[in-house]
Amino acid sequence: MKKNLSYREKLLELSKIYKIGEINSYIRNKKYLTTPQIEHILKKNKVPIPTEINKSLLEIQVKKISRPVYSTGNKISNFFGDIRSNTLKLVFKFFKSILDFLFSISKMFFNICSFISKTTINFLNGIYNISIEEKKANKILTGLIAFSFFSVVALGAFYNKDFFKQYAINDFLTEKFSGKTPEKKIKDQNFTKKEENQKKLSAPKEKPKKEKSLASVPKTKKKKEKKVDKEVSEFVLPNLNLKTETVLSLFKDVQYDLRRVRNEKRVKPIYFTQFPKDLDEIKDSRLKKETFIKIVLPLVVAENEKILDDRYKLKKILSRRSTSDKEKAWLRQKLREYKVKNSDMKELSDRMDIIPISIALAQAAKESGWGTSRFALEGNAIFGQWTWTGQGIEPLDKGKHEGHKILRFPILRASVKAYKNNLNTHRGYSDFRKKRASLRKRKKSIEGLSLTDTLDKYAKTGKEYTKILEQIIVQNSLEDFENVLLSNSVKRKELNL
């Protein structure tokens, strides 16, 4: 006998008969479609849908509904009758509690008044009868003045948190990148004329001077070396909800200028954990873009240098005849990280490579609206990566049948790292990796404008998206940042296998 099919199963059979590819692809990918969704797709493809209404089932449902109607009516009437009686009781109790409360407040008020009157009378009598000593009076007055002063300072600090934060961070940054602590600055400023005169008086004659100058040469060199170490030390800016005005003043204090970066090809390792929330309030579009680049550039350069270090290590291991257990464990980890099957070392070498800085900056600018989008500010999502399983932010313009979210990150650098892994592992960007490998093989520089045409699968708009990326790179001269390194990094030459 033929099995009685449900209405949904009949619709699925129709999709198979008429070869509706959209429904079949969903079934192959093990994605569940509801009956209305299947009906909608069949109607869209002009497939006739059978109308099945089981009358007997409807009659049973009507009977099931009509039976309890009478009993529920009785229950409702009883319920409202109970409400009337209960409301009267509640109103009576409410007014009684209010009267009791007012009576207790009035009693407490009279007690307080009597206490104040008694204490004032006793205090005045004490002043009249007791003669206060002069020393005690001075101590009391100084104590009151000191207390009032400190309370005013504390209130000022509480209401000017941002100012103190900015001041503290500026001092810390200048200490990190200029090599001078605030204490040293004060000492330099308070170097008086008396000390200079004393040095002049105590200074020896000409011959010992030469000996001193020769002896002091290595000392000065050591001091310079220490300064360089302080300049290149990494600094991760904590999550303090900094304002754009504070960020701009920080850049000014540490002399972070993009012209200098373009000329010297070096950038200071300052890592922001998030964008300023009021970045969009900058009216000057050029200043807004420069601020965005200054925040994102060190993060991109740092991730690229990390990849280059791994690439250098890989080439070094592959050039040897034998490998240690530690090196084998490292290789297994990298094969998993770059999703390479069958231990294919050539594929690993092709995937383990940098993303051009101009492309990374252009895509970050496009996907995050130069750091002002909701996804960038709420979830540190610079590159608009999608997720179906992880934690994400719901897009406002998402379609009814789209189940994706925008992937959320704890800090900005995590977003950059995920973006690099995406381009280096996803099958949609295999053309990008092949072209990059061919440039590497021919010993040509890996630049953004030569690889943008391979990223048409990053967005729905395809080739239009790649044209926009090229436009952003050219208009903002982002190709100037291609060979930029961190100020504490070492240049590594590509090893030949």
Image: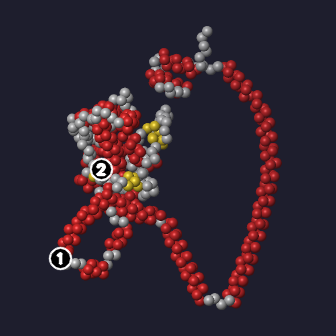
Amino acid at pointer 1:
Glu
Crowding near the residue tagged with mark 2, few <14, some 14–19, many ≥20 C-alpha atoms within 10 Å? few
Relative vertical location of residue 291 with respect to residue 67 in this rendering, above or below: below
Horizontally, residue 6 falls left or right of residue 91, namely: left
Percent of width and height locating residue 56: 68, 19
Q: In front here: 306 or 103?
A: 306
Crowding near the residue tagged with mark 1, few <14, some 14–19, many ≥20 C-alpha atoms within 10 Å? few
Amino acid at pointer 2:
Ser
Q: Identify the residue under disc 1.
A: 206
Percent of width and height locating residue 365: 35, 46
The label number, if any, that marks residue 489 in the structure image:
2
For the C terminus, which image quadrant? Answer: top left
The residue located at (81%, 40%) in the rendering is 78
The residue located at (50%, 27%) in the rendering is 31
For the N terminus, which image quadrant? Answer: top right
> How many numbered discs?
2
Element type at marker 2?
loop
Q: Is residue 40 visible?
A: no
The residue located at (47%, 26%) in the rendering is 29
